[in-house]
Amino acid sequence: MQNFWTKILIVFLLGILICGCNIDPFRLSKGENVDEKYTNKLNNKLSSETKLTEVSDDYIFTPTPVILPTLTESQMKLLSEKINSTKCTLPCFFDIIPGTTNWEEARKILLNNGANYLGYDFYEYGDSHRFTLIIGDDSINVILRKENDVINKILLKTSNNKKSKFSQIWSNYNIHNTIKQFGKPDKIYIFKDDEFLFYNIFFIYENKNIYLEWTGKVSKNKENFLCLDQKDDEAWNFNFFVSNPKNSTDFINDTNKEIKGKSEYGWRPILEALNINEEAFYSVMITNSSYCFDWNN
C-alpha cells in the first residue's frame, strides 16, 4: 500500500513538472485577464518606488509647470526700441539676418535681450530652436532654423492679450506700415470668424522671402466689413516668417505648405473674400488705412 501512494505522489509531481501546472499565485483566476495578471504580479514583486500603476482614464500624468522669468519694464522698453529700430528691418530681425548670422551669434543676441532658450523645437521641421520672451501674460516666441551653423529662417509668433502692448511693441509692423515698407503683397489670404468676431490676414512677399500674418477684432456693429488698422479694431497678434533671400525654393515650399493648411480651415484669397485683387487692396490701404472693406459672404 505504501508503494502505491508513493507511485501516486511521483506521478502527481511529474505531472506538475511536465504540464507546468505549478501552484502559481499569479495564475489567472476566473474573470481575470492577462494584463491584470501581469500588472498584479509585478506590483507585488516590485518595491513601492518602482511599482507599476495600471493605466486608466483616472491616471493622468501632469508635468510640473516651469515658470519662466518675465521682462521688466525697462527691458520691455529696450525690446520695443530694438524691434522698431529702422536700422534692422525685415528680413533682418533683432540684428539677426537669415543667410548671414551664425547660430552662436543669434543665440547670444536673444539671450542678452532677456529671451529664454527652450531647446529644440519639435513642431517645426529641420534644425529648429525655440526662444521665448515673456511680458506679463503675453509672450514672443522666436524660432530659429539653421543649416550648416548659419540661421536660414526666422519664425516669430506673438501672443498679446492687450492691444496696447501690440501698439507699443509692433507699431513698425502694423498692416499700414508694412505696406509702406514692402509695397504691394504678391498674395493675400483672409479668414474671418463670424461667431467669435475676429479676422486673420496673411501677406506673402515672394521676392523678399517674407510672409506676415495678423489677427484682429471684427467690430460688432461692422460684422459685414473688414476694417484694418483702426484703433478700435487693431490687430493684437502678429506672426512672420523670413528666410534666406538667396534661397527662394525653400521659401516657396514653406509658403505652399502654409497656404494649403490655411485653405483647409477656410482661408480665402482676397479676390474671393473681398472682391478686389492685391493691387486694389494696396492702393486703398496706402492712402486710407482706416478703410472698411465689404466682406463677401
Image (cartoon, helix red, strand yellow):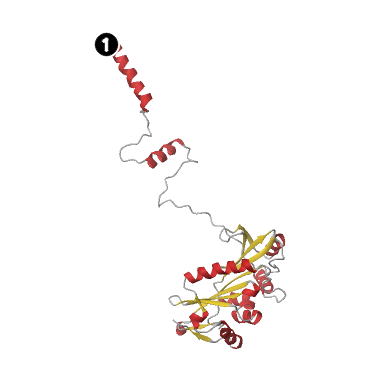
Q: In this view, does 230 lie to the left or right of 8?
A: right
Residue at (32% x, 18% y) in the render: 9
Across and down, in percent, residue 231 comes to 56, 83
Instruction: State the residue position of label 1.
Output: 1
Q: Residue most toward the front?
A: 249
Q: Quadrant of residue 156?
A: bottom right
Q: In this view, does 47 lie above or below 80?
A: above
Q: Residue most toward the bottom?
A: 287
Residue at (55% x, 77% y) in the render: 188
Q: Residue most toward the left?
A: 1
Q: In this view, does 287 lie above or below 248?
A: below
Q: Quadrant of residue 180?
A: bottom right
Which quarter shows the N terminus?
A: top left
Compare residues 200 and 110 and report the one nearer the observer.
Answer: 200
Q: Is mark 1 on a helix, strand or loop?
A: loop
Across and down, in percent, residue 34 comes to 37, 40
Compare residues 28 and 54 and report the one nearer the observer.
Answer: 28
Residue 136 seen from this side? no
Labels in figure, total: 1
Callout 1 environment at 10 Å: few (<14), some (14 to 19), or many (20+)?
few
Across and down, in percent, residue 235 comes to 55, 77
Which quarter shows the C terminus?
A: bottom left
Residue at (49% x, 80% y) in the render: 272
- What kind of residue is marked 1? Met
Residue 163 seen from this side? yes
Q: Is residue 95 above or below residue 50?
A: below
Compare residues 40 and 254 and report the one nearer the observer.
Answer: 254
